[in-house]
């Protein structure tokens, strides 16, 4: 089987358009599906599903199809989702928008898996314990002061 990367898929699709101005429906859909399967964020996710979780290629294809359906219904692509969660001043807000949409959809765990395997925290802000009793008191209240003092003694 020949390896295909995202650039070759886009190039092939653009060549088809340039050659005759239109693409037959089945070829257009095939090129579009290839772009979904071979975009960098999807490739990273597929690789991790295969090597980390041990899913079969058929199970992975099923998850990609579910992710694609979710994205089509909401008007974005996995690559857009990943890019917007990585950069920009509102990246955390964008991540939260995607996660809220996912939580209201049957694809919730699949979308979370996609984001996790692309390096995004889907669990919310991390809570760090302060280092001094004064910080514990300020952050957590009196009920934690005795516990913190015992831990630091």
Image: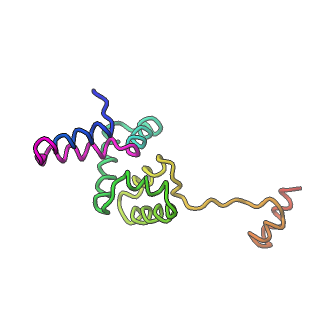
Q: Residue at x 32, y 57 (%)?
A: 71
Q: Observer-nearest residue: 56 or 47?
A: 47
In this image, 36 relative to 117: left or right? left
Q: Quadrant of the N terminus?
A: top left
Percent position (x, y) of residue 149?
A: 86, 61
Q: Is residue 134 magenta?
A: no
Give the mark count: 0
Q: Most extreme residue toward the top, as rendered?
A: 1
Where is residue 38? Give x, y as percent. 33, 41
Q: Residue furthest front?
A: 18
- Expressed as whole percent of the image width and height from the top left, the position of residue 135 reads 80, 66
The residue closer to the viewer here, 79 or 130, is: 79
The figure's colour scheme reads rainbow
Q: Main secondary structure of the magenta part?
A: helix
Residue at 49% x, 56% y is 87
131 vs 28: above or below: below
For the record, the magenta segment spans 17-42
Apparent side of residue 124 relative to residue 153 in the rendered image (left or right): left
Residue lying at the far right of the rendered structure: 153
Q: Residue at x 82, y 61 (%)?
A: 148
Q: Nearer the viewer, residue 122 or 39?
A: 39
Left or right: 16 in relation to 60: left
Q: Residue at horizontal 40%, vertical 56%?
A: 81
In the rendered image, the quadrant that contains the C terminus is: bottom right
Q: Is residue 26 magenta?
A: yes
């Amino acid at each position: 089987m020949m390896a295909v990367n995202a650039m070759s898929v886009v190039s092939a699709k653009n060549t088809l358009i340039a050659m005759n101005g239109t693409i037959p429906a089945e070829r257009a859909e095939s090129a579009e599906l290839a772009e979904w399967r071979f975009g960098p964020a999807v490739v990273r996710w597929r690789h991790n599903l295969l090597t980390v979780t041990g899913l079969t290629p058929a199970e992975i294809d099923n998850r990609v199809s579910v992710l694609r359906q979710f994205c089509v219904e909401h008007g974005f692509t996995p690559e857009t989702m990943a890019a917007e969660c990585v950069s920009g001043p509102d990246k955390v807000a964008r991540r939260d928008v995607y996660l809220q949409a996912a939580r209201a959809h049957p694809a919730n765990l699949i979308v979370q898996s996609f984001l996790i395997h692309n390096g995004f925290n889907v669990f919310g802000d991390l809570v760090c314990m302060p280092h001094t009793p004064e910080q514990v008191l300020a952050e957590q209240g009196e009920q934690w002061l005795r516990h913190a003092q015992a831990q630091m003694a």
